[in-house]
Image (tube, helix red, strand yellow):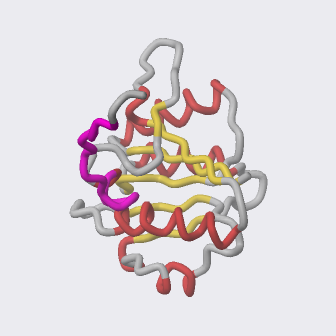
């Protein structure tokens, strides 16, 4: 029998503090892109599965951090689920004075609206709820983000 050896462990930060200490947002990963003029840093996805209240608990700190961005530009939410209301934003501690909630109208898709919001450059980050998207849609979002000097974040709820 070998003697027990003590292994030093690094001190762990609470879940969100550890992620927020890094330059990228919590739980976000750049999606591999192929094609000309693609920059994976402009597009991220966050996939959340589980009970809606748990998903909201995980999403709130991400959106709160984005709503407190020092830039004089908006955090724009495109086609959020019905549960993401003004009351939920307030209760989650988000800076509602820096947030735009937009829904597509008429024949416009949520993807088209997200691309337009990104291209205009009035938002530092455009968060969309587009579900699973294909490589072409990712490339459209990346290009629009590049044009508007913004970030695109797609939330996938499972």
Left or right of residue 146, residue 88 in this image: right
Locate residue 95: give its quadrant. bottom left
Residue toward you, 153 or 53: 53
Location of residue 83 with respect to 15 vertically, above or below: below
Residue 10 magenta: yes
Residue ID at (63%, 53%) = 48
Residue 72 magenta: no
- Span colored in magenta: 4-18
Location of residue 34 with respect to 63 vertically, above or below: above
Residue ID at (25%, 52%) = 11
Locate residue 103: give its quadrant. bottom right
Location of residue 31 with respect to 131 vertically, above or below: above
- The percent coordinates of residue 23 (x first, y second) are 27, 44
Residue ID at (58%, 53%) = 128
Q: Kindly give the residue lying farthest to the right in the view shown.
A: 107
Residue toward you, 89 or 29: 29
Left or right of residue 29, residue 107 in this image: right
Left or right of residue 28, residue 69 in this image: left
**How many marks do you count on the picture?**
0
- The percent coordinates of residue 8 (x first, y second) are 24, 41
Residue ID at (56%, 81%) = 88
Main SS, magenta region, reads: loop
- The percent coordinates of residue 16 (x first, y second) are 38, 59
- The percent coordinates of residue 123 (x first, y second) are 38, 56
The quadrant of the image that shows the N terminus is: top left
């Amino acid at each position: 029998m070998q003697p027990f050896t003590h292994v030093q462990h690094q001190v762990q930060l609470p879940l969100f503090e550890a992620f927020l200490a890094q330059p990228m947002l919590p739980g976000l990963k750049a999606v591999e892109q192929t094609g000309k003029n693609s920059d994976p840093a402009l597009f991220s996805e966050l996939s959340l599965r589980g009970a809606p209240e748990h998903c909201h608990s995980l999403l709130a700190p991400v959106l709160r951090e984005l709503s407190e961005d020092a830039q004089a530009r908006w955090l724009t939410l495109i086609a959020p689920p019905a549960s993401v209301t003004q009351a939920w934003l307030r209760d989650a501690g988000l800076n509602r004075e820096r947030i735009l909630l937009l829904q597509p109208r008429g024949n416009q898709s949520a993807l088209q609206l997200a691309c337009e919001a990104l291209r205009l450059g009035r938002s530092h980050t455009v968060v969309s709820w587009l579900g699973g998207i294909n490589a072409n849609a990712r490339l459209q979002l990346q290009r629009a983000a590049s044009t508007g000097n913004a970030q695109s974040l797609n939330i996938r709820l499972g």
